[in-house]
Amino acid sequence: GAGVSQSPSNKVTEKGKDVELRCDPISGHTALYWYRQSLGQGLEFLIYFQGNSAPDKSGLPSDRFSAERTGGSVSTLTIQRTQQEDSAVYLCASSTGGGADTQYFGPGTRLTVL
Amino acid sequence: AQSVTQLDSHVSVSEGTPVLLRCNYSSSYSPSLFWYVQHPNKGLQLLLKYTSAATLVKGINGFEAEFKKSETSFHLTKPSAHMSDAAEYFCVVSDRITDSWGKLQFGAGTQVVVTP
C-alpha cells in the first residue's frame, strides 16, 4: 500500500518568509511525528500527534515552528520568518499507535533558506 | 533521560566480510531500541527493533542485533556485507515512560562504505 508522502520534496525560500510542509501519513495510522535532519544537529524529534490527544510539542526549537493535524490525518508543519539555520530535511513518520510501534518515514522535504 | 552513542562515524568493509556497527544507549527505564538505515536520497527504513522480547533480534537483509543490558549495548551485525549495504545506519532509543514514549532519540549515524 501507499507509504508516507511529503510535499514538496524540495523548497527554497528567502530568509524571513513563511513555509508550509505537508505530510500524508499511512491510512489508518493514529500517530504522526515530525523530525528534522540537519548536518549540525543530526536527527531531532520535533512534534508528536497521537489520536485526539494534545500534541507533544516538546521538540519544537522555537515559537516560529508550529504544526497541526487536521481530521486525524494530514499534517502541516509551518515555519514562520524562516532563518538560515532552519535549512534541513524535515521528515514525517507515522505509526499505528504510539510507543514501540514501528514508525514509517516519508522521503522528507529538503528546506533551503537563502 | 535517554541517549544513544554510535561509536563509529564511518565504517569501511570489503564485500563478503562481516559488518559490526556499535551502539551504546542510556535509558532511565526499559528501553525500546531500533536500527534504521538510510540509503542516499531515500527515506529511513527500519532494519530491526528490540522491545523486551528475545535479546537477539533478527532484521531484514541478514542483519541482527543483540541487546545486552549489562553493557548497555545494542550492536548491529551482518555476517557478509553486500555492496547494497552501503548507507548510513542509525541506532535509535525510545524510553518507556509516558512523556518520552514514542519519541525516537537518534544516534549520530554510522556511514558504511563497502568496497569490492
Image (spheres, coloured by chain):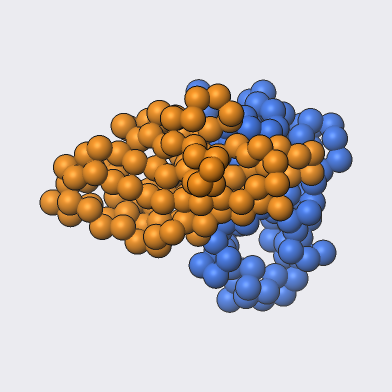
Chain colours: A blue, B orange
- The reply to whether residue B102 is visible in this rendering is no
Q: Number of callouts in the render?
A: 0
Could you say where residue A49 lies in the image, as x and y percent from the top left?
76, 39
Residue in the image at 56% along x and 50% along y: B25
Residue A62 place in picture, x, y as percent: 78, 66
Residue A76 vs B9, above or below: the answer is: above
* A13 shown above or below A34: below
Identity of the residue furthest to the front in this view:
B70
- Indicate left or right for A82 with B66 as reference: right
Q: Locate residue A91, reporting x and y percent.
A: 58, 49
Q: Position of residue B10 (x, y in %)?
A: 35, 61
Q: Is residue A71 visible?
A: yes
Question: In terms of image quadrants, where is residue B101?
Answer: top right
Q: Looking at the rendering, which quadrant does residue A66 occupy?
A: bottom right
Horizontal side, residue B81 vs residue A72: left or right? left
Q: Residue shown at 24%/44% (left/top)?
A: B18
Q: Residue at x 63, y 73 (%)?
A: A85
Of residues A94 and A59, the one nearer the viewer is A59
The residue lying toward the viewer, choosing from A109 and B116, is B116
Q: Is residue B56 left or right of residue B106?
A: left
Q: Which of the pair B102/A83 is nearer the observer?
A: B102
Residue pictured at 73% horizontal, 44% vertical: B100
Q: Is residue A113 above or below residue B106?
A: below
Q: Nearer the viewer, residue B100 or A89?
A: B100
